[in-house]
Image (spheres, rainbow, N blue to C red):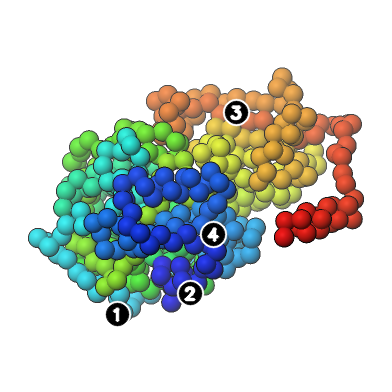
Amino acid sequence: MHDLKSYIDSLPENEKFVLSEPVNLDFCPTSLVLELEAQKRFPVVVIERSNGFDVPVVTNLFADRDRIARMVGAKPGGFGQAWSRALANLAPAVMTDRAPVHEVVMLANEVDAGQLPISRHFEADAGRYIGSGILICKDPDTGVRNLSFQRMQLKGPNRFGASLHSRGHIWDHLLRCEARGKNMEVAVVIGCHPAIYIAAAAKVAMETDELEVAGALMREPVKLVKCKTIDIEVPADAEYVIEGEILAGVHEDEGPYGEYTGYSTHRSTRNVFIVKAITHKRKPIFLDIIPGYSAEHLLLSRCTREAHVTHRLREMVPTLRAVSYPKTGVHFHAYMSFKKTAEGQARQALMMLMGLDSYVKLAVAVDDDIDVFNEDEVLWALATRFQADTDMFVVPKVFCNRLDPSSVEGMSAKVAIDATKPPNFEGERTRQTAESVAWARSVISRQLR
């Protein structure tokens, strides 16, 4: 069964941190997850009881890179291959009559979104926020479904403030709806199989239905059911669905909110979402994603970003080894490694990388002997293979992500650094024998028993 509960039940106990005592959902889950992260621990946190709500809350699901790979049936380090395979073998979703998400249906005056266990995460947050909702809407011209994440501030029983800050496909869809004087129908899915979350976080072509990507990742079509009040299809095994509309031409203040940059921001598109229905399983689970500068928030987004950029770059740079977006760079830094066969290749690859992803403001190219997922190695290459007067270039005033607090009018300078070995490089890396490394690891392992 491809739902959230079956996935959590399948996890080994040592990957779960279960709390049975009542927990205050304001701030406490966020503090717990960030403290675990500070200790280099990334378990799935299961809060069985919370003050005022009779629903278990799960968070930190996407905080571990190897766990994300296993979510799509891949081995550690194999997510990129699974992603490329999924894009080449899309699995169209199918309709079903079986709909656990419709076991409980609340319409009209029955709706009260305040009864959902929605957290307040950071001290400066304007209120309780849903950051884990997958917003599903349709292209007003083609009908192709789009999945995305947008922050939603609870403002009343049937009202949320929303910011479509990414200026992505949902933003484009809303502009076209507004041009016709129509509200945009949106379903907000909270809790479903993790593969659907991964697909929703991806940047794919507007004509691609992310639910087809999710089906390919799961190797089984996603089963959908029609919403009760709007013309949108949602995963039938979802935990919660909030049905409603984003109002055309209506704006009001929303925020501040703790964003992935690590800053609380007022920047918002100031949209309004009106709830028409809430449906859920009889015994639902509420999935939360810790926002801000948290491992799961950044990793959920960057796992597909890395895979997408790697896939596209390899079309032009066949010797590319890997692309990494380090957590320290909050989506704004990217490292790439490849086997250089001619001078000038690094600059060409760096320009392509920055062109593929408008978020990137610092791109670094290193040789294929450098592990780009180990930032110490990247910085070592920068220290020993790079000269600032010849190996970097700056592109001023380029479109960027507006949540970068250092950006000016939506633009940023882009810095590219070539930290690959220059011609006739004389340095040789110090190395150890395989035998001595194996011996050292064996000794350490015995000592730690």
SS class, disc 3: strand
Q: Which dot, 4 or 3, sits closer to the camera?
A: 4
| Disc with the residue nearer the chain's start (4 vs 1) | 4
Instruction: Give the Cα separation between the discs numbered 3 and 2.
Output: 42 Å
Residue ID for mark 4: 68
| Disc with the residue nearer the chain's start (2 vs 4) | 4
Residue located at (32% from left, 57% from top): 22
Look at the numbered discs 1 and 3 and tell me whether their residues touch, using CB distance below 8 Å.
no
Q: Position of residue 393 (x, y in %)?
A: 64, 25
Q: Is residue 336 left or right of residue 13?
A: right
Instruction: Give the Cα separation between the discs numbered 2 and 4.
Output: 18 Å
Q: Position of residue 373 (x, y in %)?
A: 65, 46
Residue ID for mark 1: 97
Instruction: Give the Cα separation between the discs numbered 1 and 3.
Output: 53 Å
Q: Is residue 309 visible?
A: yes
Q: Position of residue 416 (x, y in %)?
A: 63, 30
The amino acid on which the numbered mark 1 sits, given as a three-letter code, is: Asp
Residue located at (49% from left, 55% from top): 62
User: Which residue is the extreme one toward the bottom?
Assistant: 97
Residue located at (31% from left, 46% from top): 26
Alpha-carbon neighbours of circle 4 within 10 Å: few (<14), some, or many (≥20)? Answer: many
Residue ID for mark 2: 220
Residue ID for mark 3: 415
Q: Quadrant of residue 103?
A: bottom left
Alpha-carbon neighbours of circle 1 within 10 Å: few (<14), some, or many (≥20)? Answer: few
Figure check: 80 above or below 102: above
SS class, disc 1: loop
The amino acid on which the numbered mark 2 sits, given as a three-letter code, is: Glu
Instruction: Give the Cα separation between the discs numbered 4 and 3.
Output: 30 Å
